[in-house]
Amino acid sequence: MNMDMFHKITRAQAEYARAIDNDRLEQWPDFFADPCLYRVTTANNHAKGYEAGIIFANTKGMLIDRVTALREANIYERQTYRHIIGAPCLLSEGIEGVRSETAFLVVRIMRDGATEVFASGRYLDLWRTNGEDVKLAERIVVCDSSRVDTLMALPL
Amino acid sequence: MTMPSAQTGIDMPAWPTSALTRVPFWVFQRGDVYAREQQLVFQGAAWHYLCLEADLPEAGSFRTTFVGDVPVVVVRDTDGEICAFENRCAHRGALLCLDDDGKAKQGFTCVYHGWSYDLKGNLNGVAFLRGMKGKGGMPDTFKMSDHSPRKLRIATLYGLVYGTFSDATPPLADWLGKTIVEGIARVLDGRKPVVLARYVQALPNNWKLYVENVKDSYHASILHLFFTTFELNRLNYKGGLVVEGGGGHHISYNQLDRAQLDAAYSQQNLRSDSDYKLKDPSMLQGFNEFPDGITLQILTTFPTFVLQQIQNAIAVRQVVPRSPEKTDLHWTILGFEDDTPEQRMVRIKQANLVGAAGYISMEDGCVGGFVQRGVAGAPDLNAVLEMGGALAESSESRVSEAGLRGFWQQYRALMGL
C-alpha cells in the first residue's frame, strides 16, 4: 500500500472534518464523486445488512440538498461538531479505487455550552483518485451506538 | 379535589378543569405522575405494541422490548404461539434475556443462579433445587409453578404484536375501533414487512410531549418547512383527522388534490413558505402504492404506538418512557418482501424524510425538549388546547388539536385525573 494514497486520504479527511466543524457545510458535498454513496448507519444495522440509513444519499445532488435543507428548512438548536479522526487504515486497492477504514469521534457542542460525545464509529470508504485529488465514491458512516441524542442535524 | 398518588401517598394537584382544553404542565414533570402511569397506563387496561410478527419468524425467535419501564421478552413458542412475559427472573429479579433479539433453543436461563424458563415463561428448573449431598436446597413447600415472571396477554393485528398486563383490557380490535383497524390494514394487510433500519432516538422530554406532537396536525405545516414546501401536507389539501376509541387513538391523513390548491395558505405569511427546490428530487418520486391516493397517514394507538406512511416511507415508532424527562423513540423503518429493487430504493431514499435526521421529523426530536425546558418553572400553569374547539372528535380539518384532546381524555380516564 503506497504512502502517497495514505497521505492523500489523510489530507482529504482532515479537510472534510474542517469543512463540517468550521461551518463550511457547502464544501462538504465536494469531497464526494458523483454518483456516490453516503450512508449514516449503526453498527447493528450494518452487521444485519439493513439497507436504509439514518441519512442516505447516492448522488452529489442529494448531499447538496441536505445542506440546503439544514440551512433553509430545518429547525434545530445552534450546535457545532468537533471531529477527531484517526489515521486511515488502507484495506485494498483495485480498479474501483482504494478502500479504507478510519475511526472517528464527534463531540457536539450545544449553544448553552453543553459538550458531549455525540458519536463514535468508523468510516468505511471507497476513494477515487483524480490527479492530486481523492474523492469519496462511498462513505458508509458506521456509528458504534444505535442511539442518537435528540436529533442528527449536521452530517458526520 | 386532590388525588392521593398510588405509589407515594403524596397528593397530586387536581386537574385544573373538567374540560379537555387545558393540560397542566406538572403532568410532564412529576415523579409521582410517572409512577402512577406505570401502574395505570402501562400496566393498566391498554394494549401496547411489542414487535412485529416478522421479528419472530420461527420457534424460539425472540425480541426484547419495553412496556413503559417493564422490560419484556416476546417469543414464538414451539407450537407457533406468540408469548410475552416480563424480562425478569422470578428469583431475584435479574434480566433473563440480555439481547435485543435472537433465537432461544429451549427457553431462557437466568445467568445469576441458573433458574430456567420455557418459551412461555414458565419456571422449569432451579439450580441445586435439592441442594448438594443432601444439604441445602429449597424447602419442600417450594413449587416452581408458583413462580414465574408476569405474563402478558397477546393479540396480533396485521403483523403487529400487542400485549397487555391487564385482564380488563377489551379485545384489541374492539379497543382500537373499526377506523383504526382499517387504517392499520390499509398499510399492512396481506404484506410481509422487511426491516430496513432500526435505531433509537433519545428525546430530552416527557413521553407525552412526543405523543402530543405526533397527534398534533396543527403544527405539521408550520414547524416542518420541508413538508410544506414539497406539497406533502398543505392544510388546504383534502384530508382529515380521526379520533377513535377512548379518544387516545387517532389518524391524520391527507390526499394530494391539486385542484383544491388555493392562495389562502400563502397569505398566512407562515415562516414555512418558501421557494426552496431540490437539486435531486428523486427522493420524492415515489410509486403508487395505495389505490386510495392517500399520501400521508399518521396513525397512533394509545398510548405510545405510531404507524407512519409518508408517501412510500413506512415505519413503526414505539415511544418508551425512561424517566419523567427522558424518552426513547424506537424507529423501525420498513419495506415489504415483494418490493421491486426500484421500489426498495424509493423507500431507502424516502427514509431521509423521517427519523433522527429526517427532513420532516428531526424537529420533532427537539421540540419536546423546548417545551420541557420552557415549562420548567411553571408546573401550575396550563397548555391551551382550543384549536378546532373543545371536543375530542373526528373532523375534516386538521387545523385542530382534537387528537391531543382525545389523548388526554383517555389518559385522564385511566389515571383517575
Image (tube, coloured by chain):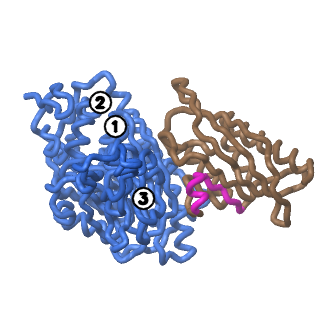
Residue drawn at x 36%, y 63% is B119
Q: In the rendered image, which residue does mark 1 sit on?
A: B206
Mark 2 burial class by Cα count in 10 Å: few <14, some 14-19, many 20+: some
Q: Amino acid at mark 1?
A: Asn
Left or right of residue B238, residue B350 in this image? right
Position above or below: A147 against B333: above
- Residue tagged 2: B29
Q: Which chain is blue in the rendering?
A: B
**Residue B416 drawn at (x, y percent):** 12, 40
Residue A79 is marked as: none
Of the chain colours in the picture, the one used for chain A is brown
Q: CA distance from mark 3 to mark 2?
A: 31 Å
Residue under the image location 85 percent in, 60 percent down:
A93
**Residue placed at 59% from the left, 47% from the top?**
A68
Chain ID of residue with mark 2: B
Please state which of the two labelled residues, at mark 3 or mark 2, is closer to the viewer.
3
Q: Residue furthest top?
A: B377
Protein chain holding label 3 = B
Q: Quadrant of residue A13?
A: top right
* Dot 1: chain letter: B
The alpha-carbon separation of the residues under discs 2 and 1 comes to 7 Å
Residue B209, quarter of the rendered image: top left
Q: Residues within 10 Å of mark 3 (few under 14, many from 20)?
A: many
On residue B63, the disc is: 3
Q: Position of residue B66 (x, y in %)?
A: 36, 49
SS under mark 1: loop
Nearer the camera: disc 3 or disc 1: 3
Q: Are marks 2 and 1 on the same chain?
A: yes
